[in-house]
Image (cartoon, helix red, strand yellow):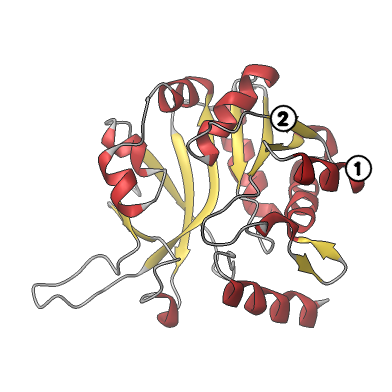
Amino acid sequence: MRYSGAVVVPARFHSSRFPGKPLAEIGDKIMIQHVYERCVKAVGGNEVYVATDSEQIAEAVKGFSGRVIMTSESCLTGTDRLAEANKQLNLDFIVNVQGDEPMVNPADIKMVFDKMQSDTSAVLNCYCEIEDHEVAMSSVPKVVVSRSQKLIYMSRAGVPFDKDNQPHAMFKQVCIYGFGREHLVSFAGQASKTQNEVYEDIEILRFLDMDIPVQMIEVAKGNLAVDTLEDLRRVRRVLLSDG
């Protein structure tokens, strides 16, 4: 059986750490256009949308012929925004690609999409090896996995720590997710963020707090997310030097 799905990029203008981030310029394109085009390269133009509550972002996306789904301003997280978007799309699954990952690998998006097309029973999330300088960066979520690559915990601290309180982080999150319809309904059914989700400011932890397992998928390193202006400068240097 092949399930119906789409890639949806959640985007909001009013980020506390970086307002207007999706519209930040990287070369001759805005950031969300870089992300959108990589999603289209992965699965084709008919399967990609941006979900936003911002008319400014919506007009910018339409300006490069992207497809937009308008959502409310009340969404607690990007995953809540996807759940709302799927009320319009009515699909079996959604692959979430964050709008602040302009270097996301299309092959990784396609891999998650293909897995969800054949099986929507698990929540999926990607991760990769962490760079040494990223261990101390609170903007980079660190990942701890089991032998079967189930998510044990995710933190902005350098987990795991040893008994001398020294960090031994080995992996970081790559923000490509796969959610079945029922996972999105359960996630958005919470009236507020869960405890660990609030402490870490990492939305995937809501699933762990709800006793819903998360299957992690390791991908090649090289992705750089944009959480701060310094991140944006790093990405500009890499993308523009490559292009």
Tag 1's secondary structure? Answer: loop
Location of residue 174 with respect to 222 vertically, above or below: above
On screen, residue 147 versus residue 238, left or right, reads left
Location of residue 35 with respect to 161 vertically, above or below: above
Label 1 crowd (10 A; few <14 / some 14-19 / many >=20): few
On screen, residue 211 versus residue 140, left or right, reads left
- Residue to which mark 2 is pinned: 70
> Mark 2: which amino acid?
Met
**As rendered, which of 12 and 186 lies closer to the eye?**
12
Q: Nearer the viewer, mark 1 or mark 2?
A: 2
Give the numbered dot on residue 65: 1
**As rendered, which of 122 and 39 lies closer to the eye?**
39
* Residue at the image point whose x is 60% and y is 20% from the top: 92
Tag 2's secondary structure? Answer: strand
Instruction: Tell me the distance, in whole angstroms, between the alpha carbons under discs 1 and 2.
Output: 15 Å
> Mark 1: which amino acid?
Ser
* Position of the C terminus by quadrant: bottom right
On screen, residue 162 versus residue 21, left or right, reads left
